[in-house]
Amino acid sequence: MKARNTLNESMEMFGLFMETVNQKSPQMAQDITPFVDDYISGRAATNIHQFRPDNMNSIGLIPKDEPDVTEEQLDMQDIMEWTEADNPPFDLENL
């Protein structure tokens, strides 16, 4: 993200510069004003991704990652099978 204080300082410096040029050469100040304006506008231009992450949804929230329960479900399935077979893979009494 561009630092807004840097942009403000640039605008202030160009304003002072244009005042000085205008005092010394009003025609030159008039001639270069469009270039200064274009430069400042280009620096102030923003892109939505500077402020909004790519994973943000349409209402402005970052969705919470859903936990992957596959491993937990497989573990429970194994436990159920061992319980039904009355043959646990480990000795429950010595845990």
Image: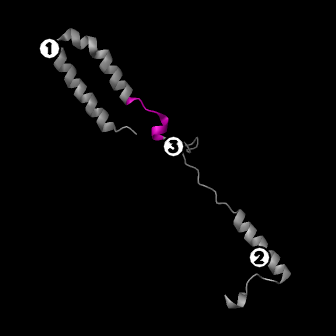
Residue at 49 percent of width and 41 percent of height: 52
Q: Farthest residue in the left direction?
A: 24
Dominant SS in magenta? helix
Mark seen at residue 73: none
Q: Farthest residue in the right direction?
A: 85
Kind of residue indicated by mark 1:
Lys
Magenta span of residues: 44-51
Q: What is the secondary structure assignment of the residue under circle 1? A: helix
Residue at 54 percent of width and 43 percent of height: 60
Of the two numbered discs 2 and 1 on the same chain, state the one appearing first in sequence: 1
| x and y, in percent, of residue 2 in the image | 37, 37
Q: Farthest residue in the top direction?
A: 27
Which corner quadrant holds the N terminus? top left
Q: Are marks 2 and 1 in contact (CB under 8 Å)?
A: no
Mark seen at residue 24: 1
Kind of residue indicated by mark 3:
Pro
Of the two numbered discs 3 and 1 on the same chain, state the one appearing first in sequence: 1
The residue that label 2 is drawn on is: 79
Query: Is 73 in the magenta?
Result: no
**Quarter of the view holding residue 5:** top left
Colouring chosen for the image of the structure: one colour
The residue that label 3 is drawn on is: 53
| x and y, in percent, of residue 94 in the image | 68, 90
Q: What is the secondary structure assignment of the residue under circle 2? A: helix
Q: CA distance from mark 2 to mark 1?
A: 88 Å
Kind of residue indicated by mark 2:
Ile
